[in-house]
Amino acid sequence: MKTNIFKITAIMLILAGSFSSCRKNTDSKYKICYENLPEEGVCGCKNPLKDLPWLKEYLESPLQLNETFIYIYKYKYGTCFRLDQPAYSNPYMDFRNCEGEKINRMGWNTSFYELLNIKQEFEIQDMENIYRKYKDGFVIDILPEKGFCNCSYPLTDLPWLENFISKYHDFDIYIDLGTYKYGTCIELRLRDENGPCLTVFKNCSGDTLGEVDSFVQNFYREFEIDYKNKQYYYRINCYP
């Protein structure tokens, strides 16, 4: 009887050890949900996820369990990786070169807090989208029937607004209307293929209340990153 109990106990211990090992290995591995890599590879590697030591270490780290998007660009010094973790509690973008050296790291929320500070300072509220003009020419015009800023059609009746729309015709333009502590507030937002570029708050006279330039756009310009030719290469640990 004692022999049987000993055998059963030994088997249970072996199985427990096996399950523990499997769990550890599973937790430390990543899952490729999507990949689209050119045949020639990048950074002299056919499979950078396995052949670049720093990238392999990054993805196989036990702490690296978040959904990650990997983009690959050309920039003024060669090839650049952008590692995105949008679902992380503190989402960020990590830029590295082929050797794994960090070019930059920035949080997704940087511009958000700058915008929030401006809105709080000037008590901006009740903003509603009233106009969209896409660079391909498509327009959504839902301006108030009575206009605003004492103009029946401000897009042409306000010279500063007409000039703004003309100056940035190569961008998608969004115009929101609301109020601030001294009257009417107009929010002007620019976007291109890579996302938000510029947000400006103005009053009816065209005076700037606040302006936020995209932190990403500034970085791309500084390092001459060809973001318009961005191609989606990898999606890691995707969630439904």
Image: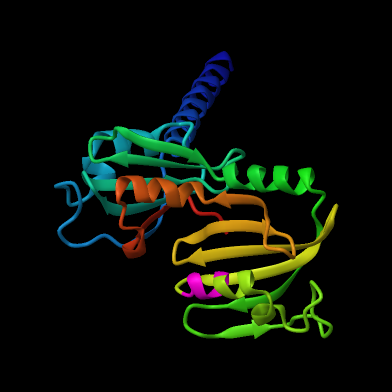
Image quarter where the C terminus lies is bottom right
Q: How many labels does the image show?
A: 0
- Asked whether 78 or 144 is in front, the reply is 144
Residue with the most extreme top position: 2
Residue 51: in sight, yes or no?
yes
Residue at 51%, 75% (x, y): give it. Answer: 166
Specify whether residue 166 is painted magenta: yes
In the drawing, does residue 25 fall left or right of residue 51?
Answer: right
Question: Which of the colour schemes (rainbow, by chain, secondary structure, one colour) is used?
Answer: rainbow
Classified by dominant secondary structure, the portion drawn in magenta counts as: helix
**Residue 189 location, quadrant:** bottom right
Question: Can you give x and y, in whole percent of width and height, for residue 68 in the image?
Answer: 46, 48
Specify whether residue 109 is painted magenta: no
Question: Can you give x and y, in whole percent of width and height, for residue 237 in the image?
Answer: 47, 49
In the drawing, does residue 75 fall left or right of residue 32?
Answer: left
Question: Can you give x and y, in whole percent of width and height, for residue 223 in the image?
Answer: 31, 45
- Asked whether 214 or 163 is in front, the reply is 163
- Asked whether 65 or 98 is in front, the reply is 98
Residue 229's place in the image compared with 223, above or below, is below
Residue 65: in sight, yes or no?
no
Question: Can you give x and y, in whole percent of width and height, for residue 115 in the image?
Answer: 67, 48
- Asked whether 115 or 179 is in front, the reply is 179
Residue 203's place in the image compared with 145, above or below, is above
Looking at the rendering, the stretch of residues picked out in magenta corresponds to 164-169
